[in-house]
Image: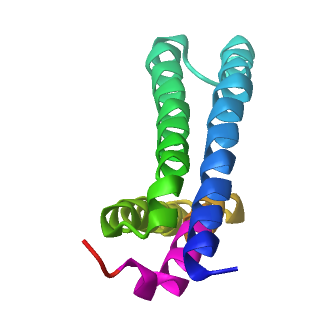
Amino acid sequence: MDRRRVAAIGCGLAGAGLVVLGVLHCALGVPSLQRAVERGLVAPRVAGPQIVNWIFSGGAMCLCGALLALWMPDLLRGRRSAWRSALVVGVFYVLVGLGAYLWVPHASVLVFSVVGAGVVGPLLYAERQFREP
């Protein structure tokens, strides 16, 4: 398997994973937040904005995942612009995961860094295949 294909498959798998995580984030997180309000763990006045933030972040994960999947054909063609764009998304997720871990040191937040590494790793492995503009 050539390096471009490895990069494209890595981005496609990470993209599909992000879409699934985004949908699960919304589908499971919002009802959980509503239950927390009912139990008195979250103040009702902050629940509305928190739900909006929760849905927005799930949608953003879906969007990033869809973009990674949509860049697959261009990665297979060796387009440098697709490589750069996918690399930006991957590095963003690595940094968000590390920053979240520094802020709240729970291992579960490192899932963002793992997803980002799943994008960045194959892209850096195939970097020499994306020299043309």
Residue 86: give x, y in percent of width and height: 43, 61
Q: Quarter of the image for the N terminus: give it.
A: bottom right
Is 24 situated above or below 61?
above
Residue 89 location, quadrant: bottom left
Residue 119 location, quadrant: bottom right
Q: Residue furthest front?
A: 77
Residue drawn 49% across and 35% down? 57
Question: Is 12 included in the stretch rendered in magenta?
Answer: no
Q: 131 or 127, which is in the foreground?
A: 131
* Residue 37 at least partly seen: yes
Residue 94: give x, y in percent of width and height: 50, 68
Q: Residue furthest left?
A: 133
Residue 63: give x, y in percent of width and height: 48, 37
Is 33 situated above or below 19?
above
Q: Is residue 71 left or right of residue 108?
A: left
Name the colouring of the figure.
Answer: rainbow
Residue drawn 63% across and 81% down? 2
Question: Is 126 included in the stretch rendered in magenta?
Answer: yes
* Residue 105 at least partly seen: no
Is 102 situated above or below 36?
below
Secondary structure predominantly adopted by residues drawn in magenta:
helix
The residue segment tinted magenta is 118-130
